[in-house]
């Protein structure tokens, strides 16, 4: 079964979302490390508030510490297509153009 992505955000160059796979986003990476990985796709990634289910993410925490679990094994065990259940991190623009 294909693995689902864990992180999605706007890619304004193409008006698409950029999905990161679990292989690209390590379970022990902090949100800051994920943000740095996202910079090639959006140089202003630090100008956004990163949220999941309406709550601001703590950028010092990992995905799991922020309440975003990797449930792929459970979906595989149940033989359920996980694609419709891909958690998305939404990026809210803060009206500045900060670059790291």
Image (cartoon, helix red, strand yellow):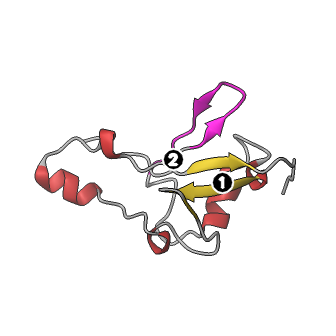
Query: In the shown orientation, is residue 91 left or right of residue 6?
Result: right
Secondary structure beneath label 2: loop
Does the stretch in magenta take in 17?
yes
* Whole-percent x, y for residue 62 in the image: 53, 71
- Are circles 1 and 2 on residues that touch, CB within 8 Å? yes
Which numbered disc flags the more N-terminal residue, 1 or 2? 2
Q: Is residue 10 magenta?
A: yes
Query: Where the C terminus falls, by quadrant?
Result: bottom right
- Magenta part of the chain: 9-21
Who is closer to the viewer here, 52 or 77?
A: 52
Which residue is depicted at the point 29% across and 59% down? 71
**Residue lying at 59% horizontally and 70% vertically, measured from the top left:** 30
Residue 74: give x, y in percent of width and height.
20, 59
Which dot marks residue 20?
2
| Picture coordinates of residue 86, whole percent (x, y) | 38, 46
The kind of secondary structure element at disc 1 is helix
């Amino acid at each position: 079964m294909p693995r689902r992505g864990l992180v999605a955000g706007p890619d304004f160059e193409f008006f698409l979302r950029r999905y990161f796979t679990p292989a690209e986003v390590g379970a022990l990476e902090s949100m800051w490390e994920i943000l740095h990985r996202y910079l090639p796709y959006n140089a202003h990634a630090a100008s956004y508030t990163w949220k999941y289910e309406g709550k601001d993410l703590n950028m010092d925490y990992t995905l799991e510490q922020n309440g975003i679990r990797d449930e792929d094994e459970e979906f595989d065990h149940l033989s359920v297509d996980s694609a419709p259940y891909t958690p998305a991190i939404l990026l809210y623009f803060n009206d500045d153009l900060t670059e790291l």
